[in-house]
Image (cartoon, helix red, strand yellow):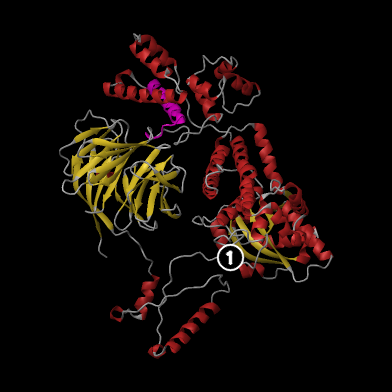
Amino acid sequence: MQTILKECMSPRVLQVKYRLKDIRATLTEYEISLMEKLPNMDEFTIELCYKILRYENLMLEPSCKWGNTPCITDVEIADDIQRIVIATNEVIGKKSEDVSETYYEGFQKRLHDILNRVDKFLHQVTCIKLYKTICKDEVHSTDILQELALLQRIDITHIVDETSLNRERISRISLAIIDSFPNIFRDIIRSIISPSQLYQMCIPHLNSFFTDQKTCLSDLQSSNSYDSFDISLIYKLLRQFSLVPSPTNGWGNAPNKIDTKLSDDIERIRHFRNQLAHRCSSNITEEEFDNYFDQFRDICKRMDLYFFQNTNYEYKIIGHKTCRIDTQMQTQYNNTLNELENLKLRFERHPIKFFWGNSFDRCLVNLRSMLMSEKSAGRQKVRVQIIFQNNADIERTIDILNSLKDEINENLSGIEFIVATKGSIVLHTDIYLEILETDALLQSTLTIFLRKILERITTSNTESIDMVLLPVEEYTQWKVSKPIGEPVYLDFDILAGFFETDGKMEEQLRQISDAFSKHSNGSGTNSDITATLLPLYLENKPTASAAFIQAQTPVKYNLPVYVTLRKQLNIKRSSNENHNITSCIKIGTALVMLVFTDCYNKRLIICNSDGTAIHHIPLSCRPYYITEVDNNTVAVSSTLDRTILIINISRSSVTNTINTSGYCYGISYDDNNLHVVIDISIIQVMDLTGKVIRTIPLPSGSIRDITVDRDRFVCRDFKSIYCCSLDGKLLWKFEKDKYQDLRRVTTDNERNVFVADRNYSVVVVSDDGEYYREILTKSDGLNRPGGIYFDKKENILLVCNLKDGKAFLFDVKKKLS
């Protein structure tokens, strides 16, 4: 641990940090005495090294997060640091009589693997040499046990100072907002139009820009550079001059998750920038923080692809999340983020506190100038957003406010409520220009309006509510967005005579559509409504009363899939045999074989479909994932060795070895090509020689397993299943809180997805991700299932447990309705 620490930070640098009191870890008096001896680190304990490595952000955190047990496939240096600490605690708490021969051998094996990887990280063989020397030395067990009894367990729980963590989280987010996102915008506009061309386009419209924006535009002539342009100005230029196609949901609206056009990400970046600049509080939970960076990383992946991988935006975002950041940097970036909007408390009417910043101030100045010079003809009102900060029951509050729109607007003067949307809660309002003439008039109007709002929602009893006002840039007439949902089926009784001619039928349909338009609550829509006429089969036509009852009955959808056990197998030759079965497949036609990857023993286990004739194929590296190439050939990936092996089963030989550019995880063969997850972030499509044909982005930065199914692929991380088109576009995502340790995925002929959850279950998810059902549990014999495979020829599901050597073949059938 001392050597790892020295590799990550020199003793003298650590000494300087300590003397500057820039150490985040909480130290005991004994540890403080050790720090006083710096740069001498010879007496540093495992716990002290662990604290510094963990809390000073000297490396990426383990995949399982600090303080947890890593998975067998997690082999970065932070994972092994976590293993060293866990192993230390394990030995300290172990009684001599509990140390069996099997336990001892297993512990030795784990330790040997850890030390090998640590030496690889350090580019030396010091640790393994020391280990071998210790093994050869004579052991004075009494002395060692006495020393061991004096040791205390290492506390690996995360004791946090929430205030410091909030400050660090917001400063890391600020790095992205202030450094990376403006550079992305500058690169976008630079790739579309030159500064000189843009300036010529702006000349006729300079009066529509703020003073500071005019200065930036004027500087284009001399600087020929966009370096002084911020997100707001570039967004306005891209939008006003139609330099990029409109976003999927239109300008000014937040994109949906599946919208991945360039303009969708432009809108996302603007949305994030405003959302963070308009916060009254710097409190950001760990979940919010991770969610922000997941979305930031997704944006940057797509931007890297847009710029042909020449930008490294994703790498920079990862750096913002994990880089070393000191107190001075935190203060600098927090202040800079605050200055983007410079929110200030303008007035307070209990319980409401009104804030607004630079953009609203500029808007007020411009509007009042227009009023005084009588240039506001034709413009009677301005669109404003009022944001509730920290509202608890957002969904319910939004529904209440939108349903009471007319009641809220009744007897209001000078202000009109339009719609409430998410983020925290955003009230879109029209304020008439005369209300903006003085601060006092604006204050009284807003107070009356907000009191009507608070009377109708549960937040009215709170001690204080922070409200932020912002102008809506370049808004058009607001239309309440309607989500695209399920089709609506309408039954009509229509006189037969109306179907005599096309003309009569068209007239009848026109009257129906007019009726819908008249009674649609005046919401309108920006897109056409499409309707399809379906034939009515009169043989089973229900009565009017029966049809009404049927319409009132909620539909309960249950996946029509069930399984029955065909065969239980035991692929473990003896009770003393240890192995880890991480994946499995069923191959062959005349001779059907089951193939299992045993990563613990570096081998494949082969047996007949009845569990007999078990034999092994030894391998040079640990196999984790497997896919069928043909009836006699498989491909396996070895994550740690960055290697794919092509193996002929009948000859028990490796026919080709492919070295990959990164850690290789899930693997699937389809359409003569291998699809391989590389570094848990991309798919490389390659032929059987290893030639990379193309790269596909993944919807998450922690994908382990995939299966390709015709024109799409399904992949998973530990908590979610994703279905994507073959160009990487997300089609749907499945996520449930009860499933936190997903492992292998496979699909059937109808594209239903079967997934093994390490917590003793197998779940089937419908082909659209909407429905799911648990079809196998611990009561069916599952014990930490490690592999799953669906045989599409025979509709058979193969499932194997990780350690106990049990595998199961299930017949899969559809229930008849």
Picture residue at 24% right of the left edge, 41% below the top: 595
From the viewer's perspective, is 197 left or right of 391? right
In the image, 607 versus 111, the foreground residue is 607
Q: Position of residue 768 (x, y in %)?
A: 39, 58
The magenta stretch spans residue 526 = no
**Vertically, is 620 above or below 412?**
above
Q: In which quarter of the image is residue 20?
A: top right
How many marks the image carries: the answer is 1
From the viewer's perspective, is 17 left or right of 596? right
Picture residue at 38% right of the left edge, 9% below the top: 143
Q: Quadrant of residue 785?
A: top left
Prevailing secondary structure of the magenta residues:
helix
In the image, 705 versus 656, the foreground residue is 656
- Asked whether residue 804 is in view, the answer is no
Picture residue at 37% right of the left edge, 69% below the top: 553
From the viewer's perspective, is 307 left or right of 376? left
SS of the residue under disc 1 = helix
Residue range in magenta is 71-93
- Asked whether residue 272 is in view, the answer is yes
Badge 1, how many Cα within 10 Å: few under 14, some, many 20+? some
In the image, 780 versus 392, the foreground residue is 780
Q: In which quarter of the image is residue 96?
A: top left
The magenta stretch spans residue 80 = yes
- Mark 1, residue position: 402
Q: Position of residue 721 (x, y in %)?
A: 40, 49
In the image, 642 versus 249, the foreground residue is 642
